[in-house]
Structure formats: structure tokens, C-alpha cells
Amino acid sequence: MAAARDHFSSRLGVLAATLGSAVGLGNIWKFPALVGQNGGASFLALYVLATLCVGLPVMIAELSIGRAGRRNVVEVFRVLAPRSAWWLVGLGAVVSCVVILGYYADVAGWVFAYVVRSASGSVATTDPAVAQASFDALVSSPLESLGWQWLVLLLAGTVIMRGASGGIEKVTRVLMPLLFLLLVGICVRSLLLPGAVEGLRFLFMPQWDRITGDVVLLAMGLAFFKMSVGMGCMLIYGSYFRDDVHIPLMATRVMICDLLVSLLAGIAIFPAVFSFGFEVSQGPALLFMTIPAVFAAIPGGSIFATLFFVLSAIAATGAILSLLEVTVSCLAERFCLSRKRAVPLVLLGLAVVGLPATLSFSSLKGVEVLGYSFFALYDVMSSAFLMPVCAIATSLFVGYAWGREKALAAMGNGASALAVWWLCRTLTPVLIAVVLLHGLGML
Ligand code: PHE
């Protein structure tokens, strides 16, 4: 089975696919606002440091485990550490993917809906209250929101059906350059607005006094969410890397390009937000209320709003492809199913799991589990618990269980491999554990 395994065919394809997973809605609705609100350039410096200590080492660890075992996320641990319980880490990753897809596909559905809505001009309003009402109408309609969510899953499933090189690589090789192009175009428009410099000041002005313990934790949490680690996504993509790809170098490239996308997103958004005097927001409020309102204020804005939602849809799709690949490859390889069989089964499962999250804004409004709506519960379960736990376990596997020689060889030997190995033994798991305890309210 291993010999016939699919692989990404070129270095550019590897970069596009891996970057496609790292770049997601986090780059658009989370990162830029967090940078601006928590100290601009000082937060950026902190984020880069956090990525070097937390996100990047785990990303390199996951990619190397995947390539060394060349199996799905569960089987890979059975091959590399037979007769042990490490395969549970892979199982945890699959569960995380299903849970995160349960709500991420929902949000992606809203983004796709907004592509159509902004193209038709139906969300063009400069009044944030009207924008809010329009967004509420979408999420509170079970049929509409479920329809968009299923459409997104179906589209992603069609790509995954074609496999790693014929599906994921082919699609991300087109989508990633397109995303950059759209971002640069919107940045230029935004920077040409009067008062744009205020937005740049908000984003980049260093404010060292804003750096508190909480902000440090925020930067660390963001670092590993951004790098898509702790979900098996990097592990499964690593299993499609050819032997001649230098993993630490490739992961560093992905980190730099991902940072660039986040910064460009900030430059596309905040000069326009400040130019028209809108409130700074993040999350759904930024994407679905502020953005349509801001672009409606610009001449020809509906074109830019549409392009902005297209690029957001691209970002969300790349992340969904990686999450879906983790689950599909696992099911297909474990039960010897073809992708044609495995994909519909996974999509069906995801439609069921995603149902309560989507309906938390309509039919199940007010229903709470542990004090959270299903939508929020899925988010907290995956980001605050499953992701950090799997990331800690992955670094401990590389640092202690795998064996020094094997781990170093898998990471390409040399100084970078040694540094990652040491980090996985020491700083990285400790820092992620601090983020985990903080997320669970224990710190
Ligand atoms: N990195 C993605 C983002 O920034 C989110 C993600 C996390 C995607 C984990 C896949 C796996 O939005």
C-alpha cells in the first residue's frame, strides 16, 4: 500500500497545499484585529517568537511523522511506534477535525453566501445595524445556512475525491496565487483612501506597554491555531511530501507566507475601516458587518467587497480541504475503501455533526451544553482542548518516544532538526500546556 501512495508532485505544490491549510479565516478575521488591539508591531514580534517556539516546531514534527510513516494519522503511529498507545493521538486528531469541521464549514457557508450577496449588491449598506440584520437573517434561516454549509462540504468533497496530487495540490496551486493577487489588489485600493495612514498606525505602531501575560498567551494560542497544528492536518500532508523536500525549510516558508497573508489582510481592512470611521471589530462582526459596510462606502465598493469575500472563501476552503483529508484518508485506508466511497460517508457524518452547530442560531437557539451553544461548544472543544492536547502529545512523541536518531533523520538532520527536537523535549510542550490550562480556565 505504501509504495502506491499518492504524493504532491512538486515543491510549489507542497507549498501551496500546506499554505492552503495554514491560511484560513484566522488570517482575516482574527490575526489583523488582534495585532492592532494588542500592541501592533510589539505583538507582531511576540507572535513571531511564539511561532518559532510553539507553532513551527510542532508543524515540523507533524510533517516529519507523516512523511516517515506515510500512513493516515492513526496508522502512522502504529507503524512508527508499534504496540503502544500513541495511535490514540491520531484518533484524537480525527475527532478534532470532525468537531472543528462541524462549525468551520458552517462559517465557510456564510462566507460563500456573502460572495453571492455582495456580488448582487444586497449587502451594500453603510449602516452597521442594517448589515447586522442582514447577517442575522442568514444565520437564523435553517434552510439557507444548512444549504450553504452542505454546498461547501460538497465542493471540498469533490476535490478530496481526486486525491492529494490530483485534487488538493491542483486546486491550491491555482487558489493560493489568486488569493495573493486579490489581497494585493484590495490593499492598493484601501491604501489610496484618505486617512489610510491611521489604519496603518493602528496595525503597526509598537506599544510595548500593551504586552501583558494574557497577551503572551494570546500570541501563543494564535501561533498554533494559525499553523494548523494539533489536528493531524500537517501530519497527513507530510505523508504526501516527497523525500527530497527539506521539511524545516518548507515549514519556515509556509510560516512566512502565512504571516504575509495576515499582514496583507490587515492592510486591506484597517486603512478602509479608519478612513470611514468604523469601529474596530474581529470575528464574524468584522467579516459580515464591518467589511460590507466599509466597502459600501467606497466608490465601486461592491466589486471590492465581492473580491474580498472570494478571497475569504478561498482561505476557508484550503483549511477545510486539509481537515477533510485527515478524516477521509483515515476512513479509506483503515477500511480499504476507495475515496469515492469514503468521501460521501464522511460528508454524511459531517452534515449530521454540523447540524446542531448550524441550528444554534435558529431552531436550537437558546439550547446550551455546559453553558455553550453547540456552535461555541465545538469551537471551545477543538481550539481550547483537543488541539493543544494533540499538539503536546505530538511534541512529546518526537522528543521522547520516537528515538533521537529516528526523529532527527525524519526531520532532515542538521542544526534545524536538532533545535526542533530539543524544543519538543523542553519548551514547546510546556508552553502549549500553559495555553491549555489558561484556555480551560485553570490558570
Ligand atoms: N489555520 C487555520 C486558520 O488560520 C485554521 C485551521 C486550524 C485549519 C487547524 C486547519 C486546522 O484559519
Image: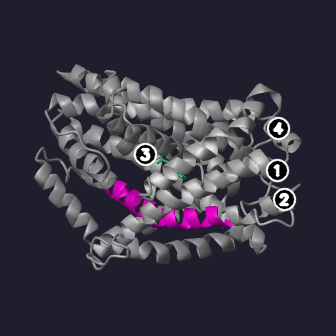
Question: Marks 3 and 1: which is nearer the front?
Answer: 1
Percent across and percent down for residue 87 are 75, 64
> Which residue in the structure is indicated by mark 2?
81
Task: Please rate how many residues cluster around mark 2, counting C-alpha atoms within 10 Å: few if below 14, some from 14 to 19, many from 20.
Answer: some
Of the numbered discs 4 and 1, the one sitting upstream in the chain is: 1
Q: Is residue 417 left or right of residue 162?
A: right
Residues drawn in magenta: 91-113
Query: How far is mark 4 from mark 1, CA to CA?
Result: 10 Å
* Type of the residue with mark 4: Leu
Dot 4 falls on a residue whose secondary structure is helix
> Which residue in the structure is indicated by mark 1?
402
The residue depicted at 38 percent of the width and 72 percent of the height is 374
Of the numbered discs 2 and 4, the one sitting upstream in the chain is: 2
Task: Please rate how many residues cluster around mark 4, counting C-alpha atoms within 10 Å: few if below 14, some from 14 to 19, many from 20.
Answer: many
Question: Marks 3 and 2: which is nearer the front?
Answer: 2
Query: How far is mark 2 from mark 4, CA to CA?
Result: 16 Å
Foreground of the two, 25 or 403: 403
The residue depicted at 20 percent of the width and 52 percent of the height is 123
* Residue 437 seen in the figure: yes
Of the numbered discs 3 and 2, the one sitting upstream in the chain is: 3
Dot 3 falls on a residue whose secondary structure is helix
> Which residue in the structure is indicated by mark 3?
26
Q: How is the image coloured?
A: one colour
Residue at disc 4, CB closer than 8 Å to ligand 1: no
